[in-house]
Image (cartoon, rainbow, N blue to C red):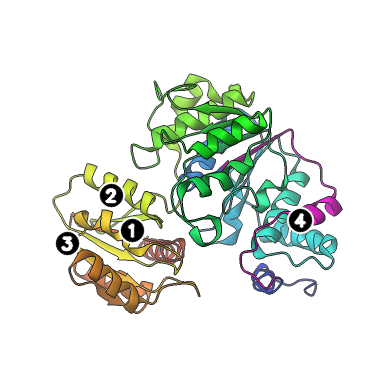
Amino acid sequence: MLPSGSPLSAWLAWLETLSPNEIDLGLERVHEVLARLEIPIAEHVIIVAGTNGKGSSVAMTSALLRAAGLRVGTYTSPHIIDYNERIAVDGNPVGDREIIAAFEKVEAARQDEPLTYFEYGTLAALVVFAEAELDVWVLEVGMGGRLDATNAIDPTAALITNVSLDHCDWLGEDVETIAAEKAGVMRGGIPVVFASTDVPRAIVDHAESIGANLLLRGRDYTLDSVPQPGLRGAFQVGNAAAVLALLDAAGLDQATDKELVAAVLPNVHLMGRGQVVEQDGVEWLLDVAHNPAAAEVLAATLAAEERTGETVAVIGMLDDKDIEGVVKPLDPHIDRWIAVTADSHRAVPAGELARRIANACGRPCLIAESPHEAMQSARRDASINDRILVTGSFYLVGPVLQRLKLYSRSQS
């Protein structure tokens, strides 16, 4: 364990050295350490899985439950700017001191188990939640579902937002195989809501085989009278309807009161998901869309918002992503592309990214050496009413958002 008094940054750097694998799907290690921790589990545990829309769904779930007077812990990943964002109590990221204290407890129970960074963080979040004596824990799956660390606890209700191609190297090469992994969050006898109208056969089959109470849009719930959330994009109404169905089925119907819903949902926002920052007459649109399905949704949002100015896209992506599948649906709505290396050791170098974008779109793509240079380039050529889209990865949106916030503070 690190020396007493070590800062959170030192802990996070150290956690990356504990496992030989950055991603090592499996529950045995987490189960073992969780048993040693002996923490009490909340009465209500909600797990949120799916390819896209998990963060939005967690944000809406938390906001509704808190408005109903319940104490709520949320665990999400990855973070946009600070690690603390991952572990929130009653809507507020917990402080460094609480996270370090939880890390110390996990370390004392870990012994020789080689936990991954994500597994360690998941266990720490559960320690924080247990000590806060919360009413509801809302856990966002990191990858897949069946073997994800969040699935080490039996949920009392589950939500699967949708299934599309992503993380194919770990989850499978087709939608049905990936769906089978995500179906692993189901339990017999508990409600599980599937939010998309495109339901893979593997979801239905697994629910039937274990006796899970599967709730489907159009059959078990509708979008009728669901207000548009503050989150950007018409598709968010579907996510909101699924969240309301989930809370109802989970016996948390105090959070689905019509007046409460009408007051809460329009005020739900989430960093890096359709987030807009206005700066000197130019709109910065930050959206972490990093797979083809998310890009298609983002493209529909861009198409629905007519503008008199141009749209410049600043994009960075990781090496396990479908670059062509992301840029092709966006390209009809983009006037200029700027490629940059995202802030991750797994990022595609800007030059390689620009080459692949140019080949996919049939036109040039500029290269920037850093997020700061990309921002300067995009802003230098932008006019009033132009829009700058920042997309492709959490590891680009975060640094850009941080710089925009620093700029905003310097001007105030």
> What amino acid is labelled 3 in the image?
Ser
Whole-number angstrom distance, CA of label 2 to CA of label 4: 40 Å
Label 4: which residue?
28
Q: Residue at x 49, y 27 (%)?
A: 216
Location of residue 369 with respect to 239 vertically, above or below: below
Whole-number angstrom distance, CA of label 2 to CA of label 1: 12 Å
Label 3: which residue?
383
Label 2: which residue?
299
Q: Earlier in the sequence, mark 2 or mark 4?
A: 4
Identity of the residue furthest to the left in this view: 308
> What amino acid is labelled 1 in the image?
Gly
Give SS at disc 4: helix
Whole-number angstrom distance, CA of label 4 to CA of label 3: 55 Å
> What amino acid is labelled 4 in the image?
Glu
Write the start and end of the magenta stretch as one range: 19-48
Label 1: which residue?
325
Q: Nearer the viewer, mark 1 or mark 3?
A: 1
Give SS at disc 2: helix
Image location (x, y in percent) of residue 298: 32, 49
Q: Nearer the viewer, mark 4 or mark 3?
A: 4
Q: Earlier in the sequence, mark 1 or mark 4?
A: 4
